[in-house]
Image (tube, rainbow, N blue to C red):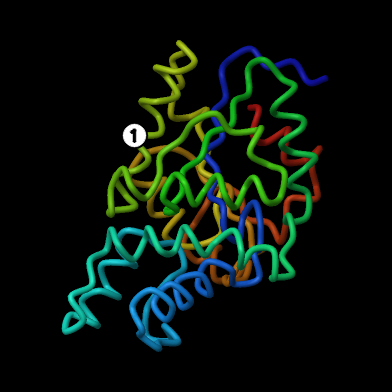
């Protein structure tokens, strides 16, 4: 095993990075709107990728302000529908994720945490469905702040508190699939591993100048050498 002499922190996005859910999140929102509130909306005009659940819910509620709809109520209904929808969708764990998580989980100086726009309950519902929840004990979530760029410092503080280690920014990586993940890392001041397993291509991600950009995470050995420097 590669010898690593300093703590490394990997901050993982979920949708499009760890998993592709087949659109389960959006479908659960549509079902929540219809079944709980009687609202039909395909959400085609609501920007989803890379955003927090709380900001998405707020936009939907503003759009339907005449229905006396509150973001907290919408998210509660969404979380009720999410496990059901996940079972119906043909999603998958993204290529290479399992191997990289197993390596990092086995190495005492490499630590995984979540940095996701999902609210915490939604994050663990999704990860549990795909058998990945055991790799992540903590993180920062969409219910910590509706502003994605505020989640990085929260995740870093929790890592330091939870693990009792001082993680330096040069050894901290955000792993994500959208330009918003890259921006979030830049605000925190850490490095970025951008992966084109979501809605954005390698070329689109490269335009935002991440330290590393790959089509997927299947090249584990090469990635380990970069992440562990």
- What residue is drawn where x is 58% and y is 54%? 194
Instruction: For the C terminus, give its image quadrant.
Output: top right
Residue 62's x, y, as percent?
20, 76
Which residue in the protein does label 1 denote? 154
Residue 222: quarter of image: top right
- What residue is drawn where x is 27% and y is 63%? 71
Residue 154: quarter of image: top left
Dot 1, how many residues are within 10 Å of its Cα: few (below 14), some (14-19), or many (20+)? Answer: some
| Above-or-below relation of 197 to 98 | below
Residue 192's x, y, as percent?
52, 46
Return the residue nearer the eye: 164 or 35. 35
Q: In the shown orientation, is residue 12 left or right of residue 79?
A: right
| Above-or-below relation of 175 to 10 | below
| Above-or-below relation of 185 to 146 | above
Return the residue nearer the eye: 207 or 106. 106
- What residue is drawn where x is 61% and y is 64%? 84
Instruction: For the N terminus, give its image quadrant.
Output: top right
Return the residue nearer the eye: 121 or 170. 121
Residue 81's x, y, as percent?
52, 65
Residue 90: quarter of image: bottom right
Secondary structure under the numbered disc 1 in the rendered image? helix
| Above-or-below relation of 8 to 114 | above
- What residue is drawn where x is 48% and y is 59%? 80
Residue 116's x, y, as percent?
46, 49
Q: In the shown orientation, is residue 218 left or right of residue 133?
A: right
The total number of labels drawn is 1
Return the residue nearer the eye: 155 or 130. 130
């Amino acid at each position: 095993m590669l010898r690593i002499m300093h703590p490394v922190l990997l901050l993982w996005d979920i949708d499009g990075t760890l998993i592709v859910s087949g659109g389960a999140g959006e479908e659960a929102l549509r079902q929540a709107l219809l079944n709980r509130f009687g609202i039909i909306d395909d959400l085609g005009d609501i920007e989803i990728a890379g955003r927090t659940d709380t900001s998405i819910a707020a936009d939907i509620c503003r759009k339907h302000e005449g229905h006396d709809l509150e973001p907290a109520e919408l998210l509660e209904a969404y979380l009720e529908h999410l496990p059901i929808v996940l079972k119906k969708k043909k999603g998958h764990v993204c290529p290479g994720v399992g191997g990289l998580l197993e390596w990092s989980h086995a190495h005492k100086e490499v630590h995984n945490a979540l940095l996701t726009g999902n609210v915490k309950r939604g994050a663990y519902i999704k990860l549990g469905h795909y058998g990945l929840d055991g790799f992540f004990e903590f993180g920062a979530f969409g219910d910590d702040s509706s502003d994605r760029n505020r989640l990085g410092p929260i995740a870093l503080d929790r890592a330091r508190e939870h693990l009792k280690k001082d993680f330096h920014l040069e050894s901290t990586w955000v792993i994500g699939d959208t330009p918003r993940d890259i921006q979030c890392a830049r605000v925190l001041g850490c490095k970025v591993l951008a992966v084109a397993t979501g809605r954005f291509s390698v070329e689109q991600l490269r335009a935002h100048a991440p330290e590393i950009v790959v089509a997927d995470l299947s090249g584990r050995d090469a990635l380990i050498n970069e992440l562990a420097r």
